[in-house]
Every structure is written in C-alpha cells, then in structure tokens.
Amino acid sequence: MRKQVLIFGLAGGVLVTLLQWTEFHFVVLEHSVAIYGVLIAILFAGTGIWLGTRLLAPRERIVEVSVPAAVPSFAKDEAARERLGITRRELEILELVARGLSNREIGETLFVSENTVKTHCSRAFDKLGARRRTEAVLRGKELGLLS
C-alpha cells in the first residue's frame, strides 16, 4: 500500500510540475512583449531616480569671508547728545529707528507701548530738527550720535 501511495504521489507531483511549467511557458510566450516592457520600464525608472538624486542633490559650498584685522570702534558724541538735550532713551529709540524697526517692533523690543515710542520719536525728531524718520537718522549720523 505504501508503495502505491508513493508512486501515485510521485506521479501526481510530476504532473503538477509539468502543468505549471506549461502554464508558465504559455504565459511567457503569450505575454513576452508586456513582460519585457515592464522590465525595461523598471530599469529606466530606477536609473532616472538614481540620476535625479545624484544630479539634483544639494552641494556644499565653502564661502570664504575676509574679516578686517581691526574694526574701528564707533564712539558716540556724548557732548552733542547733551548739547541737543536728547535723553538716553530717545537715543536708544533713534538707534532702533535707524535699524529700520517700526514703532510696534520698537515697543516690543523695549517693553513699552507704541504711544510711548511715538512720544520719544517726536521729541527726538524735534530736538534734531527733522520731520521724518530718515531725516532724523541722517541728522543723527551727521552729529555722531548713530553709527
């Protein structure tokens, strides 16, 4: 009985293998163009991705910056400040105006209200004889109050 089961099992295995091979052979012959097309598409897609990552990768750039050996320090003209009657706070706000900050930004920087900034600005502008922010900054630089 074992011998018969072994023979039938072996014959069944050979037949199943033969059927699988013929089915594979039929699929390969019938759809060979599609299979080759898919393989070529996968090859080109992989090559394109690889080239894209190589060619478009960010490159490191080394930038050399020359720094002067000695930077001359700017000394504010305290005599001019006292002569004009500009307070330290007005000068501080004038420096922030020269950096291009708005009244709101100056207020946030110095922890004061926007109205306080406006008041200090108008007083400093009056003492400098300026009507606009740019005029005040220019005048402050001419007098040596701003760097």
Image: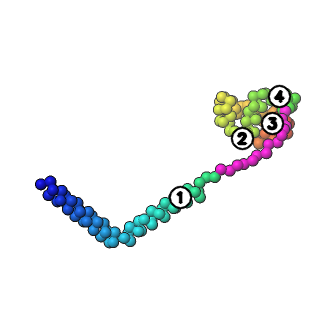
Nearer to the camera, 146 or 38 = 38
Name the residue located 79 percent from the left edge and 27 percent from the top edge.
87
What residue does disc 1 label? 50
Q: CA distance from mark 4 to mark 1?
A: 69 Å
Region rendered in magenta: 60-75
Q: Give the quarter of the image for residue 82.
A: top right
Q: Amino acid at mark 4?
A: Gly
Name the residue located 79 percent from the left edge and 39 percent from the top edge.
136
Mark 1 or mark 3: name the one nearer the start of the chain: 1
Across and down, in percent, residue 32 comes to 36, 70
Crowding near the residue tagged with mark 1, few <14, some 14–19, many ≥20 C-alpha atoms within 10 Å: few
- Is disc 1 placed on a helix, strand or loop? helix
Q: Is residue 95 left or right of residue 43?
A: right
Q: Amino acid at mark 2?
A: Gly
What residue does disc 4 label? 85
Mark 4 or mark 1: name the one nearer the start of the chain: 1
Mark 3 or mark 4: name the one nearer the start of the chain: 4
Mark 4 or mark 2: name the one nearer the start of the chain: 4
Nearer to the camera, 115 or 15 = 15
Q: Assess whether mark 1 and mark 4 are in contact (beta carbons under 8 angstroms).
A: no
Magenta segment includes 67: yes
Residue placed farthest to the left in the image?
A: 1
Q: Nearer the viewer, mark 1 or mark 3?
A: 1
Q: CA distance from mark 2 to mark 1?
A: 47 Å
What residue does disc 2 label? 100
Q: Is residue 34 left or right of residue 43?
A: left
Q: Nearer the viewer, mark 3 or mark 4?
A: 3
